[in-house]
Image (cartoon, grey):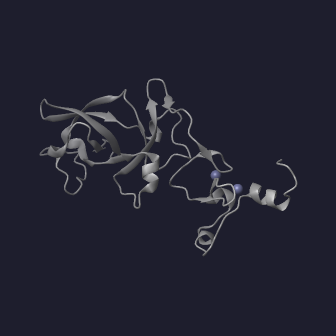
Amino acid sequence: MRGDKKKGPLKKGFDPSQLEEGSIVSVNGEDEDIYIAEVLEFESKGGPQVKLRWFYKPEDVVYGRQVWHGSKELFKQTQVSDWNSVHSVTGFCKVHTLEEYQDLDLVEEDDYFCRQAYKPNSGEFVPDIVPVFCVCETPYNPDRPMVECEDCSDWFHWSCVGVRSKDTRRRGYTYTCTSCLMKKASPDTSEI
Ligand SMILES: [Zn+2]
Ligand SMILES: [Zn+2]
């Protein structure tokens, strides 16, 4: 580590000798940003080196960050990897599936999620379509609070349907979406 100007804030208890093939790690970029990668292999040429396969951030994919991307969202990819000093690695991370991530009681700094793989060379996503929700018909963003309609069980963003956080804290609070309310109001009319 001596003479290494770009030292990242090492996570408490992190020891680079614990790295192994397949480790998911955070890396301090030259722009001071944190990047996430998988360790592929080791070498020692002029210092210990790790070959890293990068996870892409929404900013790195073809259409950039969109409103439905989570702040901790990453894209798996297999086309871009390179050699880096082992000293650029600052700690271990976890990349969960979206389902696992949703189930976390507490999202820690080193928790991320991935729901799609990305092919940097062609700009393709796998799967290329993800489920959409709400009146705005966008993919799920775990950072944006949602409410479930008790009738149709569809999910809606608080901000899209005018639900306030204090409403949802009311004891016995339930939400019914506009189209279910309309159906209830005129049960004889067939769907519009
Ligand atoms: Zn919405
Ligand atoms: Zn509904």
Q: In this view, does 42 lie to the left or right of 100?
A: left
Q: In this view, does 154 lie to the left or right of 46?
A: right
* Residue 31 in view, yes or no: no
Q: Is residue 33 left or right of residue 63?
A: left
Instruction: Give the percent coordinates (x, y) of residue 112.
Output: 39, 48
* Residue 20 in view, yes or no: yes
Instruction: Give the percent coordinates (x, y) of residue 28.
Output: 29, 45
- Residue drawn where x is 65% and y is 45% of the image: 137
Instruction: Give the percent coordinates (x, y) of residue 79.
Output: 37, 26
Q: Quadrant of the N terminus?
A: top left
Is residue 160 depicted above or below 59 in this figure?
Answer: below
Q: Is residue 97 left or right of residue 7?
A: right
Q: 187 or 2: nearer the eye? A: 187
Residue furthest to the bottom: 171
- Residue drawn where x is 64% and y is 53% of the image: 154
Instruction: Give the percent coordinates (x, y) of residue 132.
Output: 61, 44
